[in-house]
Structures are given as C-alpha cells and as structure tokens.
Image: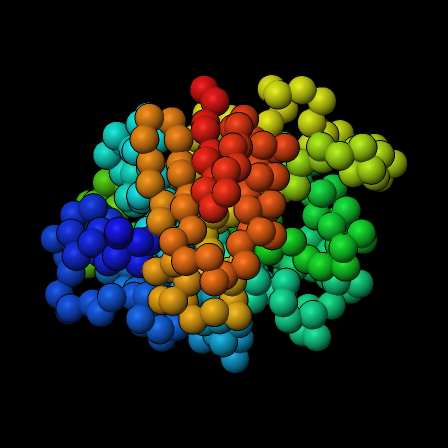
Amino acid sequence: MCNLYDDIKRIFENQQLWDYYIDKRQDEIEFPLTNKDEALHFINYYFHTGGKEVVFDTHKIFSGDSEIINDRSMHIVSTFFIGIIISDLFPDIKKEKLFLYRWFLTCLFHDYGYIIENNKEKYPPKIYNMSKIRKELSITKRFPYQKYDRDTINKYFKYIKKSRLRLDHGIIGGLLLYDRLVKNFEANFKKAKKVKTDISEMGFEYLGLQWSKNDFKLYAQSADSIVAHNIWLANKEKDKTSYREFGGIDKLIINNHTDKLSMNDAFILLLAIADTIEPIKFFSQHKEKCILQKIKISISENKIKIKILDECINYTNWFEKINDLKNWMNVSVYLESNEITISIID
C-alpha cells in the first residue's frame, strides 16, 4: 500500500503539480523531504526563482536565527505537499490560475514568525507589543485584513501575549510577508525603471519575471491566511469566558456553526487543515521519512481519510488533535480504529 511519503514523492516528480515557476527552473532540486537542509533549500528555491529571495532570507532579516526556521523546514514542506494532495476538495481555489503562486507564498512562509515567537531571549513578550515589533522589524506596510478586522487582531495579539506569554507567530508572519513582498516589488520596479523608463507598475517584466501592482491583493490574501489560520477560536466555555473578560475579541467566540471556519474561507481552511494533519510536527521524536511511511492520506468526494499503516506509533493524541477540528471548522470527524475521516461541510 502506498504511503504519504510515496505520494509526496510522486507529486514532487510531476513538477507541474507543484511548481508555479516550472518554466523558470534551471537547477535540479533534490527531493526536499530527505533532510532539513534539502527542505530549506526547496523553500529558498521557490522564493529565489520568483525573485523574492529577500522575503525569506533569514541571514539578512534575522541574522543568526536561521536555525529556528530550519528546525521546522520539513514540517513546512510536508504541509505544502499535503495541501496539494487535499486541494482537490477545494475546487473553487484549485481552479484559480494563480493557485500554486498563492499557495507557495502562504504555506512556505506560514511558520516564519516562529523566528520571533521561539526566541524569547531576543524578543521577550513582556517587552514587545505590536508597535515595538513593527518598529524592530521595520514593518511599515499595512495590509487590509479580510477574515478579522484590524482591531480584533491587535487585541488578540495582546491577549496571547498576556495569557500565553508569547508573541503570536501567525500574526507576525502575516505582517512580515506582506511588508517584505510589497517592498520587494517596489525595489524591483525602481531597478526595472532604470533599464526601461516608460514601464508601468501595473505590469512590467524584470529578471525574466512578470510583475504587477495587482499582485498586492494576492500578497494581502496570503498574509491574511497566515494570520487567520493561527487564530484560536473559542468553543469551550472557559475560553469563551476568558475572551469576554479580556474584551475586544468577542468575534472569535463560536456561538453557532456560522462562526466556524467554512468553505467561505476556503484558502484559510486549506492551510489550517493541512497544517493540523501534517504529522512531522506532531511526531517530532520520529525520523521524518519513517513517520510519513506509516501514514496514508487519501481523498474522495468531500472527505479526507487518514489511515495508520503501522500501529507501532502512538497516534491516539494525534487523532484527538485532528478530532478537535470539528470544534472550530465546519467539518465532521469520524474515528474508527486506526482511521480518522474528516468530512468538509459545505
């Protein structure tokens, strides 16, 4: 029986299934789930090929912190390919011409904020608020939040900082992505204008790539998805009480099914599900290849079926985590022995 590792490898070998820049690639890429370095190389390849290497250049942006993101590189890449596997369940976004473009920007950057969150010595939560983070990281571009309004996001950032003693990596990652993408566009436009003065921001070619200010909307959508997928919606009474007492984050309280993530938020839902069911992060004590070979993920109709192929792994807590999806998404979850099935409710 095929397993998740084999399925990802099969997708990787069919480059058109995952590579938006298929016509731009010059160097051969090793299978990225071989080790952490290859996974990080895959991420860097994608941003570099798209002329966006500065967006993901940890050595320039956060000197000395690259090891933090390197530790999550295999999870990030695995999530990227799992998202492609299950994307057929999201036909409206899968059929979009720029789906792979938006997916790589979103997924390959979604954990980048851990560079800040995990380095509490350099970025102590007691000292850093949203304003100080923006100033420290030179974030000057503001994107229009879509899923939740700016005031809710700012207050949720304060809530997490106060109650969990951490800086939310999803919010920071979204802010960084939009800021760096817009500044990268502006820098390349200036360079291109020196070569050809009559070009327009609404469409020009530079470095063998097409650029347009219209992409700012895609930048904002990707940033918003990174922010929103990491927002904890309150479904349990103790969490609801905590949110109400803190104030300003009532919109994050689930009172009925319409408050949950749904197909109306298809891209956020795709990222949130892929990130949750991705096993490398959860089974960090196992070798990455080993754990992927013990799991099978398949899709049919509106269902994602996850099957354990080797019961030598203790998957009970992982299934409990997956089962919790029904508490904040419009999905049903059915557990039977060594299988768990997620059904997306339209």
- Residue situated in front as seen by the camera: 4 or 261: 4
Extreme bottom residue here? 64
How far from the left and from the top, in percent, is residue 277?
Answer: 47, 47
Would you say 258 lies left or right of 8 here?
right
Task: Work out whether 258 lies above or below 193.
Answer: above
Q: Quadrant of the C terminus?
A: top left
- Residue ID at (39%, 31%): 303
The residue lying furthest to the right in this view is: 245
Rendered view: 136 above or below 2: below
As drawn, 28 above or below 145: below
Residue 16 in view in this figure: yes
Q: Position of residue 143 (x, y in %)?
A: 52, 41
> Dividing the picture into quarters, in which one does residue 194 lie?
bottom left
In-image side of 189 versus 148 (left or right): left
Q: Could you tell me residue 191's position as x and y percent?
A: 27, 59
| Residue 227 visible in the displayed image | no
The residue lying at 60 percent from left, 27 percent from top is 260
Give the residue displayed 47% in from the left and 46% down from the top: 338
Left or right: 285, with 164 as reference point = left
Whether residue 72 sits left or right of residue 23 in the image: it is: right
